[in-house]
Amino acid sequence: MQKEPISQEGYDKLLNEINDLKKVQRPETVIEIDIARSHGDLKENAEYHAARERLSFIEARIAELSSYLSNTQVVDPSSYEHDRVKFGTTVTLEDLDTEKIVTYKIVGGYESSPENGLISYNSPLAKQLLGKQGGDEVEIRLPSGIQEFEIISIEYK
């Protein structure tokens, strides 16, 4: 199985979240469970059940993030040229119909946040841009239909 690329920044963010869950949130929740348990009857103890549910969520999130982390590989985009659209590049496009300028950075799936200009290298948009060069005109199939863009610039930021 091929590992999914991730930036160092994305990898560090994942590690920080796992560490927070393991070292802060889980211990706090265990203490909440102990305190709620000391209040007596567990059948009707809403605090106890809420804390147990929160602990289950934390454990599931740790497992999910750990699994994801084990299937990633940190890629350093600064180690290669950015003459074509690749993982880690920031590409600026001009919509040839509206002349609107948009900028996207190609990132790993976990880091993806289209509203913030971060698109997964696996997204339909990124797949159609990968390998293209500055000045290329590209027809991109989007849910809203086919749009034509010109690649204005490709850079590593």
Image (tube, grey):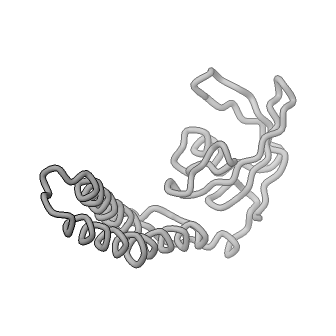
Instruction: Answer with the quarter of the image where residue 98 lies.
Output: top right
Looking at this view, name the residue that lies furthest to the right. Answer: 99
In the displayed structure image, the side of residue 12 where residue 72 appears, left or right? left
Q: Quadrant of the C terminus?
A: bottom right
Q: Residue at x 62, y 21 (%)?
A: 144
Q: Closer to the camera, 108 or 153?
A: 108
Q: Residue at x 75, y 50 (%)?
A: 91
Q: Residue at x 25, y 51 (%)?
A: 46
The x, y position of residue 97, in whole percent, is 82, 23
The x, y position of residue 148, in whole percent, is 74, 28
Q: Closer to the camera, 60 or 104?
A: 60
In the displayed structure image, the side of residue 2 where residue 146 appears, left or right? right
36 w.r.t. 102: above or below: below
Residue 1 appears in the figure: no
Residue 135 appears in the figure: yes
The x, y position of residue 32, in whole percent, is 31, 68
Looking at this view, name the residue that lies furthest to the top. Answer: 145
126 w.r.t. 10: above or below: above
